[in-house]
Amino acid sequence: MEPAHITLGECHAIAMEVLTRHGCDEANARAVADTIAAAERDHAYSHGLFRLPGYVTSLKNGKVNGKARPTVERLAPTVVRIHGDRGYAPLALEIGRAPLIEAAREFGMAALAVTRIHHFAALWPETSALAEEGLAAFAFTSSPPYLAAAGGRTKFFGTNPMSFAWPRKGRAPMAFDQASAAMARGEIQIHLRDGKTVPDGVGLDPEGNPTNDPVAILEGAQLPFGGYKGSAIALMVDLLAGPLIGEVTSIEAGDVDNGDGGAATGGELILALDPARFGGDDPIAHGERLFERMLAQEGVRLPGDRRLIARAETPENGIDVPTSLWETIDALRAA
Amino acid sequence: MEPAHITLGECHAIAMEVLTRHGCDEANARAVADTIAAAERDHAYSHGLFRLPGYVTSLKNGKVNGKARPTVERLAPTVVRIHGDRGYAPLALEIGRAPLIEAAREFGMAALAVTRIHHFAALWPETSALAEEGLAAFAFTSSPPYLAAAGGRTKFFGTNPMSFAWPRKGRAPMAFDQASAAMARGEIQIHLRDGKTVPDGVGLDPEGNPTNDPVAILEGAQLPFGGYKGSAIALMVDLLAGPLIGEVTSIEAGDVDNGDGGAATGGELILALDPARFGGDDPIAHGERLFERMLAQEGVRLPGDRRLIARAETPENGIDVPTSLWETIDALRAA
């Protein structure tokens, strides 16, 4: 079978088809398909069609509710809670967005506490969507453990990413989205596939000793980025996406997850700040002056700019799906 | 001259004496002395008496207003602004604390936008003070440039620390406070003072080449922690403590600062979240269960716990002041 070359629209339609065939209703399938298509568009392949078989696995084994009906509550003037009804995150995030934006504009800032979701994608889509509306936004979520705490020898924290987005004038927001791990798990898997070792500081073997062997690290524990500093951020993310909002910590998610490789049930915290209310004199224009001076330096990029370059090119270029993935997806369409 | 051995009370009194002699009024001197004594108490020496000569320098050359009268405004239901009147940060932070706490409890979360201050200390005192009141808190501040952006060869960002604190039951809060630099500038200065080299990855010489020489790094550029991830955090801090609240970015602070080595005029953003309003079922007890499982692992500590051990011991043990520093302080007392 040849590698497939498809359009962004076809990518979305295929994701819809597979998700509805395997347990999602229309609303849940569309929200996940939007997320998958956005990842493919931005060449964030590890969160695109590559994830579709994983989405299906957790639908089929019943861990994830494909017909989730997320519900909105107001816990405080600035705190909106979405109960995700054990569904995938995208629909809950979509439903929570409008009340979050409204509260942030009314009060200056607001939070979205998202509970009982399965977050199986990147965080930049939700922070960027808020920044597209003119808000600065943070997002935090945890996962079952993959990462040793600083000084530890076995896995304790999830990859625990944190995202931040800032609105820009007439262009896509600046958004970063970074795991607390020194190297993304997918990248370690790619080193394994290519028969390469990984650099020092990426992980520990199952006995807790430093190693450069990707197999040993995938069985052992990844290490946080920047040593104890990345570990402190992973702890912060655990507290914000867990105890603060009444959801599990990484280690608790590991206790109860069925280990199917898909996302565990858990929480996400989003904070949105309205720059118009914090006293800056045209804060967005001021941000642009900062970016301009930063980019004037040789060798310096803005976080996320590779995604934005891909975003501009994909509608014309389309998407290449690797043969093995295309075969897997084809089987899911036929099953 | 022998190294001095003094009590915590004597440390505070000496700081008061020196600061009032060189331009602070009583209120500003006391707030700064509190900060210095808290740092010595916690063995955070690089923010303790070590900073006293620097505080004096910027008072004497007129950069800092030792008689600042910070003023409070409400910009939005959740946004309190303190105009610092070009004084040192501690008095402004002290004045802003009560309205911030009140707003966070009323609305679920709130922000303190601190402008026109000179922040010459750590951030954990302000986040910890909020966590002592039961709030989770973030703080962000920038400084004149010391740090290269990822990929760059010259300084662009300040050390741009971020602090986070979480309340604990019946004990001091968990608080981390970490510069976006691989090593805090104060630590590099202490390596220099002690005639030591610094590890790889800490900085670049004035030509942009990696070096282990603290002198070359202090003249060249520090490096962010964790590569591009620490650099992204430094950018986030720049946006939050600068454009968002109408204050300068790191690079702008460098444009206007008099280069006396003391803190430039700038801003700080503090966010406070009331865990009682985010839907968690006894979030503080849940946090304790997370800490307990974390500490059950051999070799793992909580962020900030060395400070807490020192805090418990200093009142009895007192403070040793190195001879050279004691001589400098003695000269400031006599001057």
Image (cartoon, coloured by chain):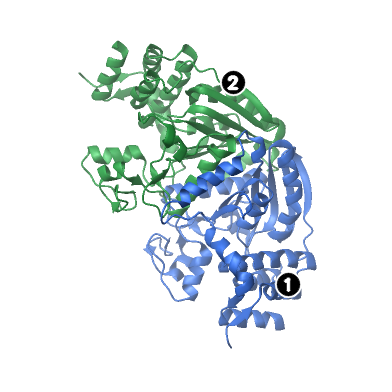
Chain colours: A green, B blue
Q: Position of residue B139 (x, y in %)?
A: 61, 50
Identify the residue at horizontal 55%, vertical 46% (top origin): B288
- Determine which residue is flagged by label 1: B16
Residue A201 is marked as none
Residue at the (77%, 55%) spot, across then down: B70
Subunit of mark 1? B
Q: Amino acid at mark 1?
A: Met
Quadrant for the C terminus of chain B, please: bottom right
In the depicted structure, whether residue A323 falls above or below residue B96: above
Of B207 and B70, the residue lying toward us? B70
Q: Nearer the viewer, residue A7 or B105?
A: B105
Query: Which residue shows up at 62% across the image and 54% down it?
Result: B171
The image shows residue B39 at horizontal and vertical percentages of 61, 65
Query: Which chain does the residue under circle 2 lie in?
Result: A
Which residue sits at x=60%, y=31%?
A112
Q: CA distance from mark 1 to mark 2?
A: 56 Å
Q: Secondary structure at mark 2?
A: strand
Left-right relation of A225 to A320: right
> Would you name the residue on which mark 2 appears?
A71
**Callout 1 secondary element:** helix
Residue A137 is drawn in which quadrant? top right
- Placement of B145 over or under A91, stated as above or below: below
User: Which residue is more in the foreground, A216 or B185?
Assistant: A216
Is residue B112 toward the left or the right of residue A68 in the image?
Answer: right
Residue B181 at what x, y percent from top left?
48, 57
